[in-house]
Image: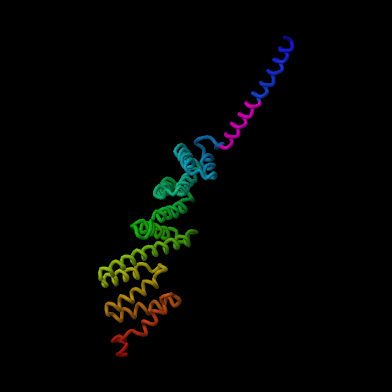
Amino acid sequence: MISNSTTSVRRFPARSAVLLLAGGLTLLLVAGGCGLGNPYPPGSYERGQYFVEKENFAEAVLALESFVRHNPTDSLAAQAQFTKATATMKMKEYPLAAVEFQILRKDYPTSPLVEDAYFQEGVAYYRQVGRVQRDITGALDARRHFRDFLARYPDSKFSEEVNGYLTDISDLVVEKRLRQCKVFRQLHRPEAVALTLDTVLTNEPQSRLLDRVLAERGKIAEKLDDPAGARTAYGRLVQQFPDSPYADAARAALNDLPETAAETSS
C-alpha cells in the first residue's frame, strides 16, 4: 500500500505540471493574439491611424468616424476626416470618398488640408469614370471640378497633376467623339462627322489626339469636296505636329489637293 501511495503521490505533481504548462502556453497565445490587435482605445485618433498603417481601411474608416463624431472640435479632427476620406479612396469607394472630402471643406474651412481635399475630391470624380464606351458625364464633372480648382489655387503644388488629369479627360472626350464619328460614317452622314470634328478642335485643344482629329477632318473635307477645308486641316497638322504618324500622309494629300480660288488668283 505504501508503494502504491507513493506512486500515486508522485504521479499527481507530474500531471499538475503538464496542466500548468498547458495553461501557461494558452495565456501566452492569448496575450500574443491581443498584441496583434489594435492597442489603442476605441474612439481615439490613434486607433484609426493604426488601422490605416495596417491597411485595414474598413476598420480605419469606422474608427476615424467615431473619433470625428465624438471630437468634432479636436485639433486632430480635420486630419482625421482627411484620413478617413483617403482610406475610403483606398477602398475604391470613390463617390463616398468625394463626399468625405466635401465634408472636410465644409466643416473645417480654415484647415490647411482644404486644398488637398479639394484636389483629392477631383481625383475621386475622375476615378469614377468608366471605359470610353460608357457615359463620360463623370469625366466632364471631374473636368469642371479641376478647372475650378485651378481658378482657386493657380499656384497650387497640385497644378501639374491637375493639368495631367485635364489632358487625360480631354483625350477621353476626343475618343468618345471619334467613336461617334465612326457611327456617322456608317450612317453616311459626312456633314455630322465634319461638325463633330470641328467641335473637338474648338473645345479640346489640350488633347494629345489632335493630330488624329486633324487627319480625319482633312479626309472628310475631301469627301465633301471642300479642298479649302482639307488644306486647312492638313496644313495645321503638318505645322503643329510635324512628327505625327499622320504627318506624311497629310503632306502627300496637300500636294494632291487642287489649288483654291484664292491661291489661283494670287
Q: Nearer the viewer, residue 12 or 42?
A: 12
Residue 181, by quadrant, is bottom left
Q: Nearer the viewer, residue 221 or 147?
A: 221
What is the quadrant of the C terminus in the image? bottom left
The reply to whether the magenta stretch includes residue 30 is yes
Q: Main secondary structure of the magenta part?
A: helix
Q: Which residues are magenta?
A: 21-36
Drawn side of residue 88 relative to residue 27, left or right: left
The percent position of residue 241, horizontal first and vertical second, equals 43, 75
Question: Which residue corresponds to the image point at 33% horizontal and 76% vertical from the top-left?
Answer: 219
Relative to 259, is 113 above or below?
Answer: above
Task: Let me know if residue 72 appears in the view.
Answer: no
In terms of depth relative to the viewer, which is nearer, 197 or 32?
A: 32
Q: From the viewer's side, name the closer residue of 38 and 166.
A: 38
Q: Residue at x 43, y 55 (%)?
A: 123
- Name the outermost residue toward the bottom: 265
Figure label count: 0
Quarter of the figure with residue 132: bottom left
* Residue 213 visible, this orientation: yes
Find out whether residue 19 is within the magenta segment. Answer: no
Instruction: From the top left corner, tell me how far across and down residue 22 is, in percent.
Output: 63, 27
